[in-house]
Amino acid sequence: MIVQLASRVVSSLLAVIGASIVSFLLLRIAPSNPATLILGQFASQEAIDNLTEEIGLEKPIWTQYWNYISGFVRGDWGYSYSLGTDVRSLLGAKLPATIELGLYAFVFAFVGALVLALLATYRRRPLVDGGVRGLSFLGLGIPPFWFGLMSLVLLSEGLGWFPGPDGRLDSGVAPPRDITGLYTLDALVTGNWAAFGDALWHLVLPAITLGLAPMGFLLRLLRANLLDVSREPFLLVVRSKGISRWTAFARHALPNAFLPTLTAAGLVLGQLLAGSVLVEKVFNWPGAGALVTDGILRQDFTTVQAFILLSAFVYVIVNLLVDIASAAIDPRIRAPRSVG
């Protein structure tokens, strides 16, 4: 188990390093000189050369990469010349909103997939199963930005049930005291129930929009696994001992079918925590998506690189934790493989 864990940690570190190298090289092959973009097209060549030297762009590319990655580890994430502030402060202000939206979208996707998969497979009623399969296809087939726009038009503008695209809180509600940057969590910790209710209400539509496609994916996977496990002979043995149908299904079929879904859920969570630019744009969500998009258009290398590296790190760490959890749940995974 220790050897397998060490192997996963090493592979995770290599994945993060690989992602940082790829993002660094892709952004560096852009045709424009960042110094020219920062100073403007009418800047003198001397000023451009001085700034190029100041930000280290005249050095070999591997030296630039080493300086960047070593500075990142020390907490120096670079400086955004286009916005006039350090990248760590920029992302620190935007990432909590993206993470909070991603967490709620994951809860919706995971819980929705679990409940619907149980409804579809427990009694195998054709009408219910067909409806659940239709929902899974619908979730995978609807473009998130279109669903978000339609939900705003119908449920916000039309019926007035949900707030519009006005950020994380209504203008008349003061944010809770900043502890984690997650409004719902900070409001719970400080007992600010008005801010908690308003922040949660603002999360409903964007979280459903962002989590709809992952829910469809997890639903199809868990339903197929439950159907396969429900046909296994060991369930007949369990039922022959006088155990009720629901107990046998919940205690024996579901855990065996759940493991592949747990691995897929880790991939989904890592993806959702990285955010969605389109969904954040539709709902005017003050996350990191718009910041990174604008950074790409401005060729703001430092901002984009820092976000990609953080996203890769979160994605890899989440999946490493899922691997550890899977090994703890299923002894077959942590058992050493025999050779021969």
Image (cartoon, rainbow, N blue to C red):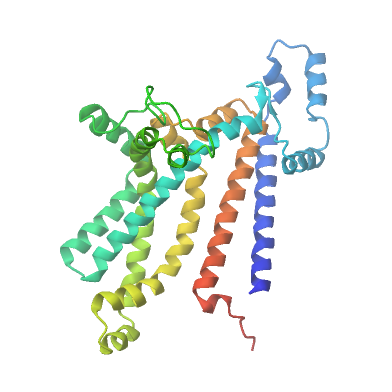
Identify which residue is drawn at 36% across, 50% down.
108
Q: Is residue 220 above or below residue 30?
A: below
Q: Is residue 246 above or below residue 51?
A: below
Q: Is residue 155 above or below residue 330?
A: above
* Quadrant location of the C terminus in the rendered image: bottom right
Residue 180 rendering spot, x and y as whole percentages: 54, 40
Q: Is residue 21 above or below residue 156?
A: below
Front-most of 124 and 107?
Answer: 107
| Residue that extends furthest to the front in the rendered view of this protein | 191
Front-most of 164 and 135?
Answer: 164
Residue 73 relative to residue 46: left or right: left
Residue 187 relative to residue 148: left or right: right
* Quadrant location of the N terminus in the rendered image: bottom right
User: Which quadrant of the figure has residue 56?
Assistant: top right
Residue 77 rendering spot, x and y as whole percentages: 70, 35
User: Which quadrant of the figure has residue 157?
Assistant: top left
Q: How many marks?
A: 0
Identify which residue is drawn at 37% across, 26% down.
170
Residue 13 relative to residue 136: left or right: right
Front-most of 150 and 98?
Answer: 98
Residue 247 rendering spot, x and y as whole percentages: 29, 76
Identify which residue is drawn at 69% across, 51% down.
17
Identify which residue is drawn at 64% across, 71% down.
4
Residue 119 rendering spot, x and y as whole percentages: 24, 64
